[in-house]
Image: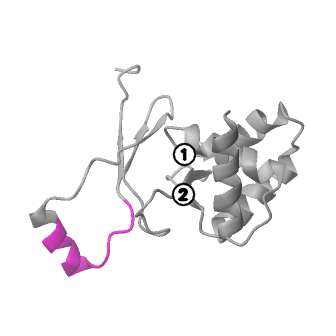
Amino acid sequence: MSESAVEQSKLLIREAGLRATPARVATLNLLQKSSSPLTHAEVAEHLSKTGVDKATAFRALNDMTEAGLLRRTELGDRVWRFELIGEGEHEHLGHPHFVCVDCGQVSCLGDIKLNQRSLSTSTQIGRITEILLRGQCVECL
């Protein structure tokens, strides 16, 4: 990991009002590199290689979620997943996700948007905060 990436992570964490601890920096860098949301177990497994224990990883995830850096999502399987809140995204309004019903693989679908008809229909029922698609991924077909 480059020195500039580490410094950028430290700056983001400090701007959110938190101390830039090694566990928080490592967690943020891991989620920045990830193409899909990660569970606490996945984050803890990765961070354990650097000496960070599960409890510290959990606190880092929760602290950064409360500070508005991360989004915590539950995709119907009773497992919390964490992802970086993208630039221009609101903490409660994320992007769509795809979950494979066979292997459980989660993929971000940031490019998918509701068409104008769907948007107008959704205003009749309330505010959509999440779109979740389920099916089989290409590996499981």
The span picked out in magenta is 119-130
Verify whether residue 123 appears in magenta: yes
Which residue, given by chain and number where applicable, does mark 1 sit on?
37
90 or 40, which is in the foreground? 90
First in residue order: circle 1 vs circle 2: 1
**Other residues around mark 1 within 10 Å, as few (<14) / some (14–19) / many (≥20):** many
Residue sitting at the far front: 4
Question: Residue at the spot x=86%, y=52% of the render?
Answer: 55
Q: At label 2, which amino acid type do we have?
A: Thr
Q: Say whether residue 40 is visible.
A: no
Q: Which mark is residue 73?
A: 2
State yes or no: discs 1 and 2 in contact (Cβ < 8 Å): yes
Q: At label 1, which amino acid type do we have?
A: Pro
Question: Residue at the spot x=32%, y=69% of the render?
Answer: 128
Q: Say whether residue 96 is visible.
A: yes
Judge whether 30 appears above or below 22 on screen.
above
- The quarter of the displayed image where residue 122 is located: bottom left
Question: Residue at the spot x=83%, y=55% of the render?
Answer: 21
Residue 79 locus on image (x, y percent)? 62, 50
Provide the secondary structure element on which disc 1 rests.
Answer: loop
138 or 77, which is in the foreground? 138
Judge whether 113 appears above or below 33 on screen.
below
Residue sitting at the far left: 117
